Amino acid sequence: MNTFASSSADPIIAQNLVRYFGDVKAVDGINITVKTGEIFGFLGPNGAGKSTAVRMLTTLLRPTSGTATVAGFDVAKHPDEVRRRIGVALQDAAIDPLMTGTELLRLQAVLYGIPQAQMKNRASELLERVGLTAAADRRVGTYSGGMRRRLDLALALIHQPTVLFLDEPTTGLDPMSRMSLWEEVRRLNNEGTTVMLTTQYLEEADQLADRIAIIDAGKIVREGKPQDLKAGVGFPTLLITVPSDQTERAKAVLATFGDMRPTAEGSLGVGLRGGANVVTDVVRKLDEASVRVQHLEVNEPSLDDVFAEATGHRLEGAKA
Amino acid sequence: MTVATSDVVIETTARSRQLSIRQTIAMAKRSTVELARQPALIAPSMFFPIFFAVLSASSFSKTTAIPGFPKVESFMQFTLASTIVQGVLFGSVTGAAALATDIENGFFDRLLLAPTTRTGILLGRLAGSALFGLFQSAFFLAVLVPFDAPITAGIPGALVMVLSGGIVSLAIGAIMSSVAIRTGSAEAVQGAFPLLFVLLFFSSAFFPRETMSGAYKRIADINPISYLVEGLRALVLEGLTFSAVVRALLVPTVICLAAILFALKELNRKLAAL
Amino acid sequence: MSTQQNAASVAMPTTMRSARGLAHRGIRNIRRLPSAFFPAMAMPVFTMIAFAGTFAAITRLPGFPTDRSVNWFMPLGICFGAAFSGIGLGFSTIRDIETRFYDRLLMSPAPRRSLIIGPLLTAWVRVAILCAFVIPMGMLLGVRFTSGLLGLLTLVVAAIGVSTISLGWGLGLAYRFRDMRGAAVMQLTMFVVLYLSTAQMPLPLMSGWLHDVARINPATNILRLARQGLVRPDSPDYMSWSNTWGGLLAIAGMATLTLVFARRGLDKLDR
């Protein structure tokens, strides 16, 4: 078997990847192919199996079955070769609070075999790049959440990896820090780094990813370019809120305009077969049925709709 | 557990006394149940003292012939008294840890705000440790006496020893509470513990004072733990004498009362500062 | 700067360089978190003073190999301290696993053995600091080496041996438990193994079951190695080749076992 695949191979290939924890199947036979130079978004709610899948791809966890090659090497058979070629920014930016930014970068450089002569330059370049030069000699314990993430990213880049894994890189960050991290990810990608990004934020996936896979309960339920996936949902969603005693009547009316869609508690949604043009007709029919509309909005298809359509429920906390 | 509610303020004195007794009992129950539910925390304080007793009985069996060593049947008989004190000390580490957690969870704030007697609540909180101290002492005697370590004072002597163990436990709890109230810091409570072990070691707990010399002997001579252990030891080696009973019960009682008074004083000081 | 694809040009990290990098971190943390190191220093001093003071009279027993109780108990204190140095690194490994800092180390291409050798170097440095502190203190309290520098050397070698054994044990348990339950098991077991030896009494003066256990406990050989330069020259435990190799063999055997235990635990971390 050719485990030393050629360098032209896709940087991440997972085939039927399965992982059990005891009797629990955390990852249930996923298949992914990430192309060179892509930003690939791995989208799903907490506990969907994203992190488990990434831990397998980054050699931290052995697959129960299935295979994966990353940067051309089998993760189970040649973990060291994989490790040399990937950079990983971890979910909670686990960094030793007693060390300074520079010390951590140097330790990372040593662990990745960066020659002594290059170490100093490399560390200061990276600190500059992520805007931490001024804080370089402060203990990490004094850093803000955003600074920790940026340092984490710098650590992941110390050996100029060809494939970068970002596991929930912006969870818990304020909007400003989030934007600046996105900027940096785009810049890295433009320089040729393939990025695999896991996130529970629809907007993040939509903004950054060239292609996404939606994972739910350990299975990939949709995969493709965000715009294609959204187009696949087709019609825009009409969301209305009505008094609770009129819900049934409203549903009957809406059903004549398209398929009902899952919504947050308290509202009704329908995929408008006739597009946004038919909204006035819908309102008229509701009025005729004596339904009082309290709130109305028309949404172009979003990744949340894709997610809802694929799984039957909305992504938690991702409501527009 | 909630204690302070606004209608308590309008209770009559009699009813408030009744309430305070109820609170004390509730606290005692809580702290006892808390200990009983955590066998993993209790186990080391049951195992280690027995381990050390058995270990030193075997290690030091020949030392009983050293000049100045009291007349004993075995080293185990000699070490019976120190096992109780040491075991209770070990055991109250658990109580202190619970106390530390209480501080972090704001228990002492509630204590400060309680409308009725604070002594009762404090004692109630310590009751779990005291009961555990009684239980430990009885357990150690039951396990070790059959190993060539008879108690000369017989059953009454054994009862005095068990009672003494309970009071020692209460005393340590009271000391730790005053540290807790004074500093309000869980770490300070935990950090105070090694000091107690140092105190235990610099006493005649493990070897007779008669065989010691120099500075070490002088420290042991002024260490109250020496007199406590020697009181218990006299019950084992000599019999039920007035002096033995007084030392076994009086030393921990005095320490206990002093610590509780100090704890309450600290509590009032805090209250005045509110 | 650009992130051109040059991973292949980066050399494979070597074991010793990676281990030194990790050791550097561990040593720095001694300075930055002294509260974690303090018990490992205070404990041997306390053991030495308290045991030597309390049990001073045991030196009067006929056949006791020294007339100075500090000579007898200082090596015990140092061995306890050395054991805690190794175990302390087990604790910090558990902390690293819990905070996921360890994931960072595991994802690096650094050779796996460097993840064990790094902490081992740290443990040795801690033992060196320990000896540099406790031995002069012991000498102030009356410790006298009866066989000069050689005695000092064998004591330090024994301490390094104990720290190696306890490090392997500590890491092995850290990799298996992965939480603070492991810490309790580490302490308890090391404690019991050291005590079930000639910790308090020389073999000929012991009796019963403890004598039988201590006779076959390798910790007895290690303590003999540690104490051989501190006992009377006419004692059978005095500095000799046979007392030395017995100790070295015990260290080699136990250290091999615990380090293999650690390595296997490390290899199973991804299970």
Image: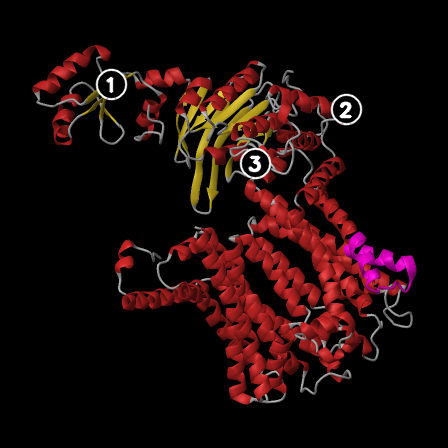
Span highlighted in magenta in the image: C131-159
Q: Position of residue B187 (x, y in %)?
A: 56, 53
Cα separation, mark 3 vs mark 1, equals: 42 Å
* Letter of the chain that mark 3 sits on in the rendering: A
Q: Any mark on residue C259, and which?
A: none
SS for tag 3?
A: loop
Residue C83 within the segment the image draws in magenta: no
SS for tag 2?
A: helix
Q: To which quarter of the image does residue A299 belong?
A: top left
Q: Amino acid at mark 3?
A: Ala
Q: Which residue is mark 3?
A: A94
- Label 1 vs 2, first from the N-terminus: 2
Q: Amino acid at mark 2?
A: Ala
SS for tag 1?
A: strand
- Label 3 vs 2, first from the N-terminus: 3
Main SS of the magenta segment? helix
